Image (cartoon, rainbow, N blue to C red):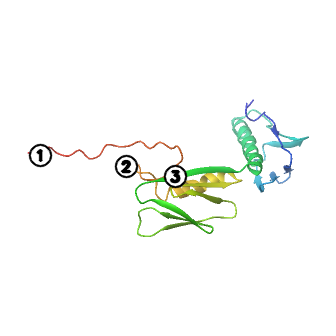
Amino acid sequence: MSRIGRKPIVIPAGVTVTIDEAAHTVDVKGPKGSLHSTYNPLMNVKVEGNEVLVTRPNDENLSKSLHGLTRTNIANMVNGVVTEYEKKLEIQGVGYRCAKQGTKLVLTLGFSHPVNIEETDDIKIDWVDANNFTIRGVDKQKVGQFAAEVRAKKPPEPYKGKGIRYLGEVVRHKEGKAGKAKK
């Protein structure tokens, strides 16, 4: 039995979980927002009291792999509507900076033009200072995807480490070009 899949998901106060077994959907509403997701028809999802239980019908490999996945996805939804997920990013490099203008984050990354990133309905951007900002939202997958897209605008390069990186990310540096000895 899956160690993760058999754990019940405790529903905190102020959160409602609605399961439609016919359509295989889960709706979670909480103080920070609401989420909607579908799950595989092989899984059995039930709300009992203040817990959500995920069970599998048999011990086939597909059922085993979906068991823990389904439980984790629903647990992430419940956690997201209570406490938002966030990714902290930092900018390193001479002349690289960010600024917030309304709902846009304006990045100066050494290009001939500034890079504008617009907030969405699901994703909010918190500006901390000229080199740090935070991306937050209730959906863990969307927060991670949005942060990866922002980081892809100027990923850290391996020679000087300049670019956008996650807070605490370690960039392995390469040695520079070895010059020839002068005669």
Task: Find disc 3 in the rendering and name its residue.
Answer: 90
For the residue pair 174 and 90, the one nearer the viewer reads as 90
Q: Label 2, label 3: how many angstroms apart (C-alpha)? A: 15 Å
Lower sequence index among marks 2 and 3: 3
Looking at the image, which residue sits at the far left?
A: 183
Can you say whether 172 is above or below 132 in the image? Answer: above
Task: Find disc 2 in the rendering and name its residue.
Answer: 160
Tell me which corner region of the image, top left, top right, bottom left or bottom right, holds residue 12.
top right
Quadrant holding the N terminus: top right
Q: Label 1, label 3: how many angstroms apart (C-alpha)? A: 40 Å
The label number, if any, that marks residue 182 in the structure image: 1
Q: Give the class, few, some or many, for how many residues have Cα within 10 Å of label 3's Cα (few <14, many ≥20).
A: many
Q: In what element is the residue under mark 2? A: loop
For the residue pair 81 and 99, the one nearer the viewer reads as 99
- For the residue marked with disc 1, what is the amino acid? Lys
Q: Give the class, few, some or many, for how many residues have Cα within 10 Å of label 1's Cα (few <14, many ≥20).
A: few
**Residue shown at 46% from the left, 57% from the top:** 154
Q: Position of residue 29 (x, y in %)?
A: 82, 54
Q: Position of residue 174 (x, y in %)?
A: 35, 43
Q: Give the class, few, some or many, for how many residues have Cα within 10 Å of label 2's Cα (few <14, many ≥20).
A: some
For residue 7, side relative to residue 107 (left or right): right
- For the residue marked with disc 2, what is the amino acid? Lys
